Amino acid sequence: MLDQTVKDQLTAITGVERFSDTHEQRLVYSYDATPGFQSEPDGVIRPASVQEVQAIINVCREHHIPIIPRGSGTNLCAGTVPSQGGIVMVFMHMNRILEVDKENLTMTVQPGVITLDITKRAEAEGLFYPPDPSSMKISTIAGNINENSGGLRGLKYGVTKDYVLGLEAVLANGEVIRTGGKLAKDTAGYDFTKLLTGAEGTLGIVTEAILKLVPKPETKKTALALFPNMEQAAESVSAIIADKIIPATLEFVDQPTLQAVEDFAEIGLPVDAGAVLLMEQDGDPEVVNRHMEAMQQLCKKYGAISVRLAQNEEEALALTEARRSALTALARRRPTTLLEDATVPRSKLAEMVRFIEETAAAYEVEICTFGHAGDGNLHPTCMTDVRNHAEMERVEEAFAAIFAKAVDLGGTITGEHGVGEMKAPYLEWKLGQAGVDAMKAVKQALDPDNILNPGKIFAKDTKKRIVLGGGTRE
């Protein structure tokens, strides 16, 4: 708990109305969207300016109090759980779009702006902000930046880091730095913009961002392809990419997920298919028509039962929203839903899906899989009950095996969800000890007192031991 001296210093900065340490507020900010992780902070503070952020950091540094910057808490890696207590910093009073610069194709925003509001504002100006995490209706831009969020359009357009041109951030010593800018080129020193993007608030607190915008696509078309099994769907994905087509969206859903989504959305999805590909292309009308026709033919060539082109914008939106609702749909099945994130090369997609199915059976847990087929980003999702400790142990072991397999196939333990606290024990599997040590050196240099989101990314104990394919990974 905070002593009165600290509380007086903090409320002198923000006023009593923007600081709270009531039990109710501490409970509300004790968890994020990651099941199984919860810890109460000592207080919650809501700055309204970069100067207030500086002053808060200086107080916390003086008293060695952790600071956990937080958006809407939609992250899935326990990245904003205050596991070591401290102050949760929320940016609801720093939520303005400061500028849309059409000459430079940029938008400057404060950290608390909702992602969907950025998308809508860009489109109102005839422009386009492509990153589209499934949480975009409620997630904040600084949360997206901290986690380097992806989305359905990641294959063609990239992820959040590809649209962050510059940042204003407050470091652990209270100093403000500005990185990047409205520039097409900038090689002046280390790329701190990219370093802070995806750092999960462990190196600095983002207080402003310059985002890249692109021209709004002229048109878009959507199609749904049904397959008897995942292998044929994966072959179609490889064939589409090999044909030099980069779709705006290329998503897959397995049969159990499809059934759950249809039960939830009730839009007439074909629940008897073994796998489904959702395909979208946008851009020049002639190119869109040509690509959509080619993708339909390739899917049929590789065994699609049928390929259906959305007849209007309403039907296309319904199909896309159905895919976005996959987690919500699956969450209705059991009290606890764990959505994970592993990425493999596209050519290994079918093999990875098969392994997930085999692993679920071996550990006697229920796992459904959907994700971004075009970039090999899988979201195995386990429906369980956190109160069943024996089952939760099997779930953890199953996911450890899945992460290990992803790395063995040339992939990674996370493609867009971040490391946080949940995946910290597996980071060394991907980076090796030297890689982890290099990251720790950066953290130590920028935050020697370890007050910025401590306990994230680097695990206290990395000794997770599993047996895989005849070998042992530890």
Image: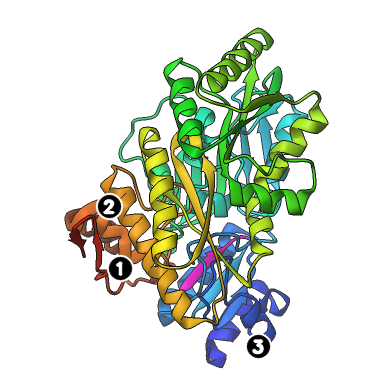
Mark 3 residue element: helix
| Horizontal side of residue 307 vs 463, given as left or right | right
Vertical side of 441 occupied by 343: above or below: above
Q: Measure the alpha-carbon separation of dots 3 and 1.
A: 31 Å
**Residue 333 location (% of width, % of height):** 66, 65
Q: Measure the alpha-carbon separation of dots 2 and 3.
A: 39 Å
Which label's residue is closer to the chain start, 3 or 1? Answer: 3
Q: Measure the alpha-carbon separation of dots 2 and 1.
A: 25 Å
Closer to the camera in the image, 83 or 450: 83
**Residue 294 location (% of width, % of height):** 57, 13
Circle 3 crowding by C-alpha within 10 Å: few under 14, some 14–19, many from 20: few
Residue carrying label 3: 23
Q: Is residue 165 magenta?
A: no
Which label's residue is closer to the chain start, 2 or 1? Answer: 2
Closer to the camera in the image, 60 or 136: 136
Res. 305 image quadrant: top right
The residue stretch that appears in magenta: 66-71
Mark 2 residue element: helix
Identified by mark 3, the residue type is: His
Identified by mark 2, the residue type is: Lys
Res. 462 image quadrant: bottom left
Q: Is residue 67 magenta?
A: yes
